[in-house]
Image (cartoon, helix red, strand yellow):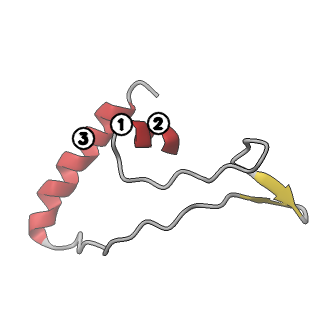
Amino acid sequence: MLRHALEKGWPVAPALQANDGRTVVEAAGWLWALFPFLPGEPVDYKALPMKGVKGRLLARFHSDMADF
C-alpha cells in the first residue's frame, strides 16, 4: 500500500528491500521492516485552518487509493 501511495505522489517512506527483495524479514522470532527517514517538520493539525487542508488531503488520498 505504501508503494502504491508513493507511485501516486504521496510523501511516504515505503519499507526498504532486503537483498532478496522482501520488505519484511524474520529475525530472532520477530518480523522486521526498515523504513528510511523522511525529513521535515510535523504540522499542527489541531489548528483550525489545518482542518480544511486535512479534509481535502483525506479525500484525495481516498481517491488515489481507490485502485489499490
Q: Earlier in the sequence, mark 3 or mark 1?
A: 1
Disc on res. 59: 3
Location of mark 1 (residue): 8
Q: Is residue 16 left or right of residue 2?
A: right
The answer to which of 68 and 7 lies nearer the viewer is 7
Residue drawn 60% across the image and 53% down it? 15
Coordinates of residue 39 in the picture (x, y in percent): 39, 70
Looking at numbered disc 1 in the image, what kind of residue is underneath it? Lys
For the point 23% across and 75% down, the residue is: 44
Number of residues whose C-alpha sits closer than 10 Å to that of mark 2, classed few (under 14), some (14–19) or many (20 or more): some
Residue in view at x 11 percent, y 69 percent:
48
In the rendering, which numbered label is found on residue 4?
2
Quarter holding residue 41? bottom left
Please give the name of the residue rendered at 87% of the width and 61% of the height, measured from the top-left corner.
27
Direction from residue 9 to residue 12 in the image, left or right: right
Pick whichever of labels 2 and 3 is earlier in the sequence: 2
Label 3 crowd bin: few (<14), some (14–19), many (20+), radius 10 Å: few
As drawn, 11 above or below 61: below
Crowd around label 1: few <14 · some 14–19 · many ≥20 (10 Å): few
SS state under label 3: helix
